[in-house]
Image (spheres, rainbow, N blue to C red):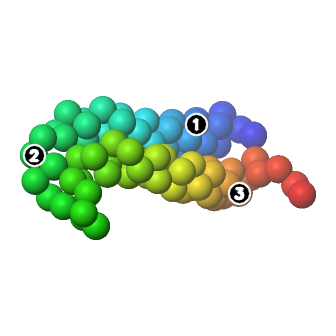
Amino acid sequence: MSDSTGDRYWKRTSTLMWTMLGLWAFFSLIVHMFVEPLNKIVIAGFPLGFYMAAQGSLIVFVVMLFVFAKAQEKIDTEEGVAEEE
């Protein structure tokens, strides 16, 4: 891998990593700071704040794992560093 390819690869990987970290921080910290206003919204008989704390964040984290893996695989393939299977 040449230096320019390596730099481009790291820039794309780093951008993906920081984006996922930002989303993680939002769903694990910021959303829970607004539990009181969110509790005014009711879904399936449960206040939204409770739902986000109990289930919503966990669902988002699992989805984020799959999105990250797929996006990183795409970056690896496009930059020519994907693992052969």
Instruction: Calculate the distance from the C-alpha at mark 1 to the C-alpha at mark 2.
Output: 40 Å
**Residue 21, how many percent across, how many down?**
43, 36
Quarter holding the N terminus? top right
Q: Look at mark 1 in the image and give the residue it sits on.
A: 10
Depth check: 53 or 25 in front?
A: 53
* First in sequence: mark 1 vs mark 2: 1
Dot 2 falls on a residue whose secondary structure is helix
Q: Is residue 52 visible?
A: yes
* First in sequence: mark 3 vs mark 2: 2
Which dot marks residue 84?
A: none
Dot 3 falls on a residue whose secondary structure is helix
Q: Residues within 10 Å of mark 2 (few under 14, many from 20)?
A: few
Residue plotted at (46% across, 46% down): 58
The residue type indicated by label 1 comes to: Trp
Residue plotted at (82% across, 50% down): 83
**Residue 65, how many percent across, how many down?**
57, 49
Depth check: 17 or 67 in front?
A: 67
Q: Look at mark 2 in the image and give the residue it sits on.
A: 37
The residue type indicated by label 3 comes to: Thr
* First in sequence: mark 3 vs mark 1: 1
Left or right, 50 with reference to 7: left
Which dot marks residue 77?
A: 3
Q: Nearer the viewer, mark 1 or mark 2?
A: 2
Left or right, 9 with reference to 41: right
Instruction: Calculate the distance from the C-alpha at mark 3 to the C-alpha at mark 2.
Output: 44 Å
Left or right, 74 with reference to 83: left
Residue reaching furthest to the bottom: 44
Residue reaching furthest to the front: 45
Q: Residues within 10 Å of mark 3 (few under 14, many from 20)?
A: few
Depth check: 3 or 65 in front?
A: 65
Residue plotted at (41% across, 50% down): 55
Q: Quadrant of residue 41?
A: bottom left
